[in-house]
Image (cartoon, helix red, strand yellow):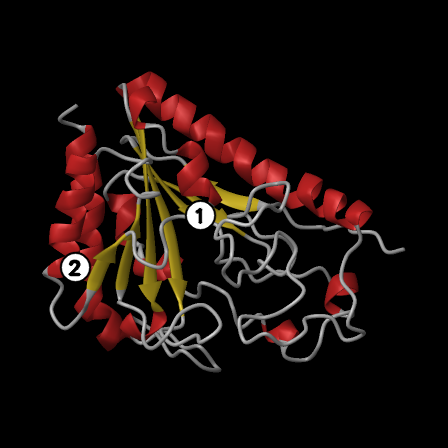
C-alpha cells in the first residue's frame, strides 16, 4: 500500500476585477518525488501537459480576468474529471481521474500498477478538492459582485492523437456541453470569432464538448456561463520534446484567443 503527500499548493490564483475566471486545470507539471520514482522515464517528462497556456493567455490579466492555474500534473490527478472518476465520454477511450496510461496508451507506472482507492482519496483531498473549492468560491464571488460569472476552461492537446480521434483535430475546439453550459447566443458569437482565425479551423461541440469543469459549473439559468477551449498545440508550440513555445507561431493565434476572451467579457457586461 502506498500513500500520497505533496509539499506544493494545489494551485496559483490571481483575482481580477471583471466577471471572468480562466481555469487552467492541465498546465501543472509537478509530481511529488515519491510518486515520480514510481513512474516510467517517459511519464516523468509529463508529455500530456497543456504546456505554456499561462504565456499564451498572458494578456488576460490586463483585461481584468481572474486566473486559476493548476500546479500538479494531470498524472497526479485530473482536475477536469468528476471526483468519482465517472467517464465523460462513455464508449470512447479516455484517461481516468488518476491516470494509469499516457495519451499514447503507454503505462505511466514502471511496475504496471496504479494507485489504490486510499491513495486516490489522498490525492483528491490534497489537490482536486482545493482547486475546485477555489474555482467554486471565485465563481460565486463574481456572480455576487457582477450579477453574472463567466468561466473559460483553457486546454491544449496534440493535434494528432489516434487514441482519441481520427486524423488531425480542428485547431479551436469550443465546448459548451452540447449547449447546456452557456447561453447559445454566446456560443455562436464565439464560434463566429474562432472561424475567422486566419489559417486555423474551428468547431463547436465536436470531439471535445467540455469536461467536468464546463459541465458541472456551467449553469446559465443561474447566471454562470462556462466554455471550454481545446486548442491544438501546433497552433502555438512544438508538439514533441522539448515542447518549446514558438512565439512566431503563437503570435498568429493569440489575437483570436484574445478576441474570444473579450467576447466573454462583453457578453457578461451587457447582461
Q: Quadrant of residue 145?
A: top left
Q: Secondary structure at mark 1?
A: loop
Q: Quadrant of residue 33?
A: bottom right
Instruction: Residue lying at the far front in this picture: please name it.
Output: 91
**Mark 2 or 1, nearer chain start:** 1
What is the number of the mark on residue 83?
A: none
Q: Please name the residue that numbered disc 2 is placed on.
A: 255
At 47% from the left and 48% from the top, the residue drawn is: 69
Percent across and percent down for residue 28 are 53, 58
11 relative to 141, above or below: below
Left or right: residue 14 compared with residue 78: left
244 relative to 2, above or below: below
Dot 1 surroundings within 10 Å: few (below 14), some, or many (20 or more)?
A: many
Dot 2 surroundings within 10 Å: few (below 14), some, or many (20 or more)?
A: few
Q: Nearer the viewer, residue 266 or 78?
A: 78
Percent across and percent down for residue 167 are 34, 77
Q: CA distance from mark 2 to mark 1?
A: 25 Å
Left or right: residue 190 compared with residue 165: left
At 17% from the left and 51% from the top, the residue drawn is: 191
At 28% from the left and 39% from the top, the residue drawn is: 179
Q: Secondary structure at mark 2?
A: helix
At 28% from the left and 30% from the top, the residue drawn is: 19
Left or right: residue 251 compared with residue 82: left
Percent across and percent down for residue 245 are 36, 73
Q: Quadrant of residue 162?
A: bottom left
Quadrant of the frame with the N terminus: bottom right
What is the number of the mark on residue 211?
A: 1
Closer to viewer: mark 2 or mark 1: 1
218 relative to 142, above or below: below
Instruction: Check contact, mark 2 vs mark 1: CB within 8 A.
Output: no
Percent across and percent down for residue 54 are 38, 57
Quadrant of the frame with the C terminus: top left
Amino acid at each position: 500500500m502506498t500513500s500520497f503527500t505533496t509539499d506544493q499548493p494545489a494551485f496559483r490564483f490571481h483575482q481580477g476585477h471583471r466577471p471572468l475566471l480562466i481555469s487552467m486545470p492541465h498546465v501543472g507539471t509537478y509530481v511529488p518525488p515519491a510518486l515520480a520514482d514510481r513512474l516510467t522515464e517517459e511519464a516523468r517528462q509529463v508529455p500530456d501537459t497543456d504546456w505554456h497556456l499561462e504565456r499564451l493567455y498572458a494578456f488576460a490579466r490586463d483585461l481584468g480576468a481572474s486566473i486559476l492555474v493548476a500546479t500538479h500534473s494531470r498524472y497526479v490527478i485530473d482536475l477536469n474529471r468528476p471526483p468519482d472518476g465517472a467517464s465523460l465520454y462513455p464508449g470512447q477511450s479516455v484517461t481516468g481521474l488518476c491516470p494509469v496510461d499516457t495519451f499514447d496508451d503507454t503505462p505511466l507506472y514502471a511496475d504496471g500498477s496504479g494507485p489504490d482507492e486510499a491513495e486516490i482519496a489522498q490525492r483528491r483531498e490534497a489537490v482536486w478538492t482545493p482547486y475546485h473549492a477555489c474555482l467554486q468560491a471565485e465563481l460565486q464571488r463574481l456572480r455576487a459582485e457582477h450579477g453574472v460569472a463567466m468561466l473559460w476552461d483553457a486546454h491544449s492537446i496534440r493535434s494528432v492523437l489516434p487514441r482519441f480521434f481520427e486524423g488531425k483535430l480542428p485547431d479551436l475546439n469550443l465546448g459548451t456541453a452540447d449547449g447546456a453550459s452557456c447561453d447559445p447566443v454566446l456560443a455562436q458569437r464565439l464560434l463566429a470569432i474562432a472561424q475567422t482565425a486566419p489559417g486555423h479551423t474551428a468547431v463547436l461541440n465536436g470531439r471535445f464538448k467540455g469536461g467536468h469543469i464546463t459541465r458541472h459549473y456551467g449553469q446559465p439559468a443561474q447566471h454562470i456561463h462556462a466554455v471550454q477551449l481545446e486548442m491544438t498545440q501546433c497552433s502555438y508550440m512544438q508538439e514533441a520534446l522539448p515542447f518549446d513555445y514558438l512565439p512566431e507561431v503563437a503570435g498568429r493565434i493569440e489575437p483570436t484567443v484574445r478576441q474570444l476572451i473579450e467576447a466573454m467579457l462583453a457578453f457578461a457586461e451587457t447582461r
